[in-house]
Amino acid sequence: MGMIALLVVSVLFIVIATVKLKLHPFLALLLAAFGFGIAAGMPLKDVVKSVNSGFGDTIGNIGIVILAGCIIGAFLEKSGGAYRLAGGALRVTGRRNVPLAMTIVGYVVSIPVFCDSGFVLLAPLNRALARKAGTPLAAGAVALSLGLYVTHTMVPPTPGPVGAAGVLGADLGLVILLGMVTSIVAALAGWLFAVKIAGRIRLAPETDAPEDADPVADRDAPSAPKALVPILLPILLIVFRSVAELPSRPFGAGQAVALLGFLGQPVVALLLGMFAAFLLPKRFDREMLSTTGWVGQAMTGAAIIIIITGAGGAFGRVLQTSGIADVIGAGLKGRESIGILLPILIAAGIKTAQGSSTVSLLTTAGLVLPLLPSLGLDGEAAKALVVVAIGAGSMVVSHANDSYFWVVTQFSGMTVNQGYRIQTLGTLVSGAAAAATVWVLGMIIL
């Protein structure tokens, strides 16, 4: 069997194993890695070596980063900080512009908080504001959903983009910069869709979701500016480090720049953000840092993402070692213009087939890693843009095999048919806007 046919079979196996057989993505990716390597005729010791090194190197690069990001998200959510951010957004936009406020707060909250948790947390606020302002409930729900989704898939330190960047060896600061540009366009497209299209749908005002999703009394929640600190601090440190290390050296080369180079390392920046998050609760309790407290709960969730990321890295390393890049490179000769579109299409196919955006991000990163030189995408800026491209593809589309689809529909009172008409179509619109933005950025910087 040819290399490309083996690759297709491997991808189909991952999709079928996770969707039909309900196999954990970690097992599916690991089995695909071993299966591909053996079927491709690699020496058995090289297969084992590639799996071990790919898994270990990937986790070594991003394990602590993902863990710290999940802890930040847990403290932001459980302290009531995310709820306060929503209130701050409303003061900026005005209470009549509920969909815009929901887009903004969703965009910010989902940088450290998983999109499904963010939606559960903020859906009651959207319902209350829609009733008070007399705006369509569906418009605010879809605006919130898509605002959460764009940063969930494209902006670190969300685990999916961080993991993909780790697999591809992309600079996290560049990923943040390009991801924010792309996700802002996607969020605006989602907001317009929510107002113009989703707002026409009338939803039942009452749902089975709990009315009070604020886990902390309002008086105990941190202020909106304080809640922003754990999010913005690591992002700014990472971005400034990337800017400082540009060939033009805009900040010079003194001790201050060396310190910035240290503080802007993703692992250091996220740990500083984590320590800032510890200051969010009004009454700090050491139990929060225990194995059963907020930190322990965050670690449990982070562990799943970390091992899936490592398995994706193992699969990618086996592909890289097998020499498939040379085979595909020869097939792409004269077709290099497909470039940045290929990761988008692969990610969209995997996302639509198996449902999880995070699995799509990590699986696609492993698949395209050995193809980057053939596609002319092995430069630093190019690798960062590939991560964002994979994130854009991983938005398309959210439907019945995606747990987020059910969170949005059930907490908004949508029927399944309504969910397909506005949630699924909305992810297609935002994803297409993101893909178009990536293509334009590729024309400019590649």
Image: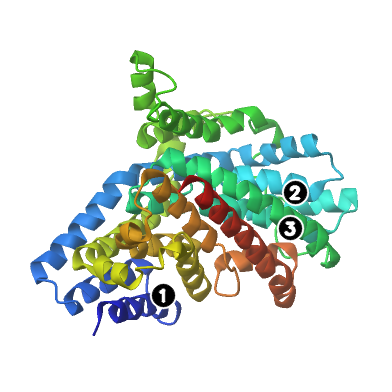
The residue that appears at 76% across and 55% down in the rendered structure is 192
Question: On the rendered image, what quadrant is the N terminus found in?
Answer: bottom left
Residue at disc 2, secondary structure: helix
Relative to 150, is 228 above or below? above
Residue at disc 1, secondary structure: helix
Residue 33, by quadrant, is bottom left
Nearer the observer, disc 2 or disc 3? 3
Residue position marked by numbered label 3 in the rendering = 141
Which amino acid is tagged 2? Leu
Which amino acid is tagged 3? Ala
Which residue sits furthest top? 255
Relative to 267, is 425 above or below? below
Percent across and percent down for residue 371 are 33, 62
Which amino acid is tagged 1? Thr
Which residue sits furthest bottom? 1
Query: In this image, 325 relative to 344: left or right?
Result: left
Percent across and percent down for residue 422 are 73, 68
Query: In this image, 104 relative to 74: left or right?
Result: right
